[in-house]
Image (cartoon, helix red, strand yellow):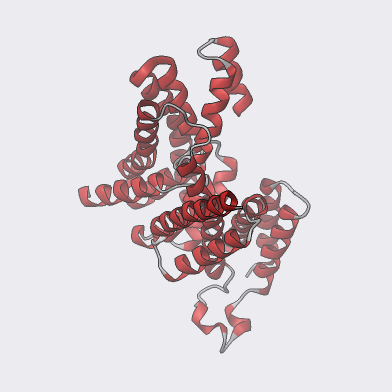
Amino acid sequence: MIIKLFELFVSFFKIGIFGFGGGYSMLSMIIGEADKFSISAAQMADLNALDMVVPGPIAINAATYVGYLYAGVFGAVFATFGVILPSFIIVTLIMRFIAKYRGNKIMDGFLTGGKPAAVGLIAAGAATIAASVLLQPNAVLSAIFTNPLETISIFLVAVFAVTAVANIRFKVNPILLTVLAGIAGAFLAK
Amino acid sequence: MLPVIENDIVVKYKMMPREDFLEYATLSQSLPGVIALNCATFVGRRAAGTLGMLAAGFGATVSAFALMIAATILLNIIPQQGPVAGAFRGIRAASAALIFAAAFTLGRHNIKTVFSVIVMLAAFTAVIFWNGGAPFVILAAGFAGYFYQRIKSKKKAEK
């Protein structure tokens, strides 16, 4: 148990301290570590859906969720503490040692690379989840070339495509899209 | 959320001038970690030192933590059978699409140069093949960005 709590703390501390680019960037890092905490891609997808209805920062919600599923309430406390601790440390260091914040060249340069990398990480997180949740029940991705129709659910791929286009192109509210996808799934998904 | 906090901090409690608050809010976005929490810790520390920082920071965390525990427990007691299982499958497909949409939205503002396209593709490929390599990827990309900016400003100076 203590080892589990320590693992959660270390993982989420790492995510907090390297978490450039906001909540989704950290969420994609958590997707990358999900295996370690026996969290499935489907559970990570559920987390993102919960994020839309539960107010509060994505990374704190994610730490609480993963920590709770892996090691109960104490797990949630350790994971959340891990992800928030870097903020206290970094803010303290900055306020103590850097007199002038704005136009800091090192920071600006770092973000020139960090932000595009965050875009890549988030896209990779989406791909990881999609590669698992768009399959037929009990199918594995490796069968995609030999038996595509029994591996991939055409209906779920359509839900994915419609949701992405509706949100990106027409700015349809994510909560509405999630609810619609749930209703469609209840009637149509096998 | 930001205008509400700004009003409380600047107008209601007069803790600091508006420019200072806005500077903290902007800086919070370029630092790693939870953006809202970074902002809370800056404001708390400025207004009331270390104790203020702890109070503001934990204040910004506790409500999300409590609500999320409750939501997770509720989610786990929903029986996933029949139409409910179908609904969950639809929701997960939409959820994956919305994460992809988040990448797209962030990319629209930050992917403008050849350099940024290369970094984005390299980061994507690296984490697909290396589970858990994200922190290293971010660091490497950050250093690449720093040197890219330095080379660019040197070239400008030579002209």
Q: Residue sitting at 52 percent across and 69 percent down?
A: A132
Q: Residue sitting at 40 percent across and 55 percent down?
A: B135
| Quarter in which the N terminus of chain B is drawn | top right
Q: Residue sitting at 38 percent across and 61 percent down?
A: B132
Where is residue B15 shown, x and y percent of the image? 50, 12
In the rendered image, the residue lying farthest to the left is A2
Front residue of B85 and B44 = B44
In the rendered image, the residue lying farthest to the bottom is A146
Front residue of A54 and A138 = A54
Where is residue B113 shown, x and y percent of the image? 64, 58
Is residue B78 something that shows in the picture?
no
Number of numbered tags placed on the structure image? 0
As drawn, is A10 to the left or to the right of B151?
left
Where is residue B70 shown, x and y percent of the image? 46, 39
Against B126, residue B30 (above or below) is: above
Where is residue A81 shown, x and y percent of the image? 34, 38
In the rendered image, the residue lying farthest to the right is A170
Against B39, residue A73 (above or below) is: below
Against A115, residue A123 (above or below) is: below
Against B157, residue B25 (above or below) is: above
In the rendered image, the residue lying farthest to the front is B158
Front residue of B92 and A22 = A22
Q: Residue sitting at 60 percent across and 82 percent down?
A: A150
Is residue B158 something that shows in the picture?
yes
Front residue of B17 and B56 = B17
